[in-house]
């Protein structure tokens, strides 16, 4: 069993630069048609990925992205912080421009991230978007566009896609 390794961002960014377009094409194909047994393979690979990637050595998602806060998140987190929902929104959130006008963090990195430890200060009540991130088990047809974005930010997503590509390539080769 391989132990998790701290994320080397310089190396990670280089790998992303070299493989981003290839990974995106692969994900686009999966959005259109998934091979038989794909979801089982995704679950298996996800388990492998979490043995290799340590989120606490990274926290790049919290440093460079903002979750979407839904109404339940706002209610739960504001209560946890002893604020009214309006106080919480005024202090920490902003409305997205155009589109659905979702609630987002005012700042990046996330105001609840401890930059020394990479721990979340509201982990127990964090937004649903954070709790589900990086959405590796989600259906590729529905989440392919999300994975295309996340391969640039999340080493776990990158590794998941990389492993999927290798496994599916091996499966195709073994059938020939």
Image (tube, rainbow, N blue to C red):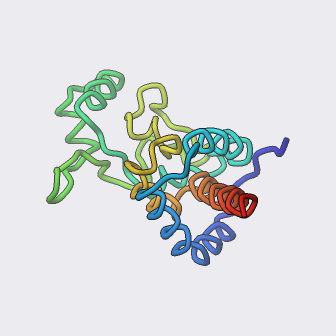
- Quadrant location of the N terminus in the rendered image: top right
In the rendered structure, the answer to whether residue 125 lies left or right of residue 151 reads left
Compare residues 66 and 137 and report the one nearer the observer.
137
- Quadrant location of the C terminus in the rendered image: bottom right
In the rendered structure, the answer to whether residue 33 lies left or right of residue 40 reads left
In the rendered structure, the answer to whether residue 45 lies left or right of residue 146 reads right
Q: Residue furthest bottom?
A: 18
Residue 13 at x, y = what percent? 60, 70
Q: Is residue 167 above or below residue 24?
A: above
Q: Residue furthest front?
A: 176
Residue 156 at x, y = what percent? 61, 51
Residue 25 at x, y = what percent? 49, 70
Residue 17 at x, y = what percent? 57, 76
Compare residues 25 and 171 and report the one nearer the observer.
171
Q: Is residue 101 above or below residue 71?
A: below
Q: Going 66% across and 49% down the picture, which residue do you hit?
A: 57
In the rendered structure, the answer to whether residue 22 lies left or right of residue 53 reads left
Give the tally of numbered discs: 0
Q: Going 32% across and 48% down the picture, which residue do you hit?
A: 105
Compare residues 19 and 165 and report the one nearer the observer.
165
Compare residues 61 and 84 and report the one nearer the observer.
61
Q: Residue furthest right?
A: 1
Q: Going 37% across and 35% down the picture, which residue do you hit?
A: 127
Q: Is residue 84 above or below residue 107?
A: above
Q: Going 20% across and 33% down the picture, which residue do you hit?
A: 87
Q: Which of the 4 quarters of the picture holds residue 39?
A: top right
């Amino acid at each position: 069993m391989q132990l998790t390794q701290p994320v080397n961002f310089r190396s990670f960014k280089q790998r992303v630069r070299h493989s981003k377009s290839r990974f995106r094409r692969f994900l686009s194909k999966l959005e259109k048609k998934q091979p038989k047994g794909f979801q089982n393979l995704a679950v298996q690979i996800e388990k492998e990925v979490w043995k290799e990637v340590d989120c606490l050595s990274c926290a790049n998602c919290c440093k460079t992205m903002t979750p979407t806060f839904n109404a339940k998140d706002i209610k739960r987190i504001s209560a946890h912080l002893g604020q009214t929902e309006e106080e919480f929104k005024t202090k920490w959130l902003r409305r997205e421009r155009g589109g659905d006008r979702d609630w987002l963090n005012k700042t990046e990195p996330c105001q609840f991230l401890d930059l020394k430890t990479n721990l979340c200060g509201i982990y127990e009540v964090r937004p649903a978007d954070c709790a589900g991130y990086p959405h590796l088990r989600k259906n590729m047809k529905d989440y392919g566009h999300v994975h295309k974005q996340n391969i640039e930010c999340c080493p776990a997503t990158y590794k998941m896609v990389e492993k999927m590509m290798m496994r599916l390539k091996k499966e195709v080769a073994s059938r020939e």
